[in-house]
Image (spheres, grey):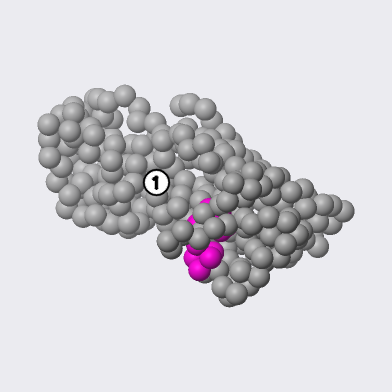
Amino acid sequence: MDIQSLETFLQVAHLENFTKTAEVMNYAQSTVTMQIKRLEQELGFPLFERIGRKNHLTAAGEAFLPQAAEILRILQKVRALNINSAEIQGTLRIGVLESIMFTAILAVLPQFSVQFPNIDVMLKIGQSTELLTLLKQNQLDFIYISNSMNTDKMLHCCYRRAEEIIFTAWSGHPLARRKKIPIAELLHYPFIVAEPSGRCYSRLQEIAGEQNITLRHSVIVDNIHAIATLQLNTDKISFLPAYSLEKQLNRGELVRLDVDLPPQIYYSQILYHNNKWIPPYMEAFIDLVRIARPEKAEI
């Protein structure tokens, strides 16, 4: 019973399709078929039965599923024993939001590369919904996203930091020096908004709905730095995580608006699949993130 066959079995069990598994794992379909047949011969019972276009687990396959995940974790741990960090080879696949990429990930990469010089880091920048899908398909080892607290029982949250979403404007904006700006007045200004699928956009829509106001979207752009630049010398407002605009706020290009509204809190978090074994280099990377941006339960 080898690591590759167990990994293939778990992937087929998740995707219910040999062809999709081959695509995800970058195998020929014949390789997937061979590995499953070899595992079935070793176990002495069939793992899958084909019904329609899907490969469903047999009763024996269902019973073996949690055991396979546990055996895989044990085999991977044994393989990693007594190996110096400088000698470990592999690839760490990280899914991350664009805003967090520049705020946290890039800051820890140099130190990680020194500690694990033979680990390749593959960064996938995307939106939360896309990254969550890729994580569940085992195409990513962990994801670092900002959203409401995770409630998916398939996923484990190993890092959580409370973040605040704030309203910002150009330093020369008419509202820049106002105190306790009524939210209804603020929402009548044009906004530059991020992607509609994101938490910031959905929360902004909720706030507008509570005020019975239809937002004016002058620009929708999927890039935090572009939003910050487009705000300069205009009357446009943004609603984004405070961490994503730290540089512009510190330089005085943008200002945080004092809005008569309670703090808008959500969480940046690192998630991985419950069945995932955490290799030492993945654990080290997450520890570096904790050092760079300490966990914070609330603001």
Q: Give how far across and how far down residue 96 sits, in percent.
A: 49, 53
- Residue bearing mark 1: 245
Q: In this view, does 73 lie to the left or right of 18?
A: right
Q: Which residue is drawn at 36% across and 53% down?
A: 224
13 falls in the magenta region: yes
Q: Give how far across and how far down residue 45 sits, in percent.
A: 68, 55
Hey, what amino acid is under mark 1? Answer: Leu
Q: Which residue is drawn at 84% across and 57% down?
A: 83
Q: Quadrant of residue 46?
A: bottom right
Q: Is residue 160 visible?
A: yes
Q: Nearer the viewer, residue 273 or 183?
A: 273
Query: In the displayed structure, would residue 192 be above or below residue 120?
Result: above
Magenta stretch, main secondary structure, is helix
Q: Is residue 1 left or right of residue 198?
A: right
- Under circle 1, the secondary element is helix
Q: Give how far across and how far down residue 128 sits, in percent.
A: 41, 49
Q: Give the range drawn in magenta.
A: 11-21
> Looking at the image, how many numbered discs can be counted on the residues?
1
Q: In which quarter of the image is residue 264?
A: top left
Q: Is residue 286 left or right of residue 178?
A: right
Q: Give how far across and how far down residue 165 sits, in percent.
A: 36, 37
Q: Which residue is drawn at 53% across and 65% down?
A: 18
Q: In which quarter of the image is the N terminus?
A: bottom right
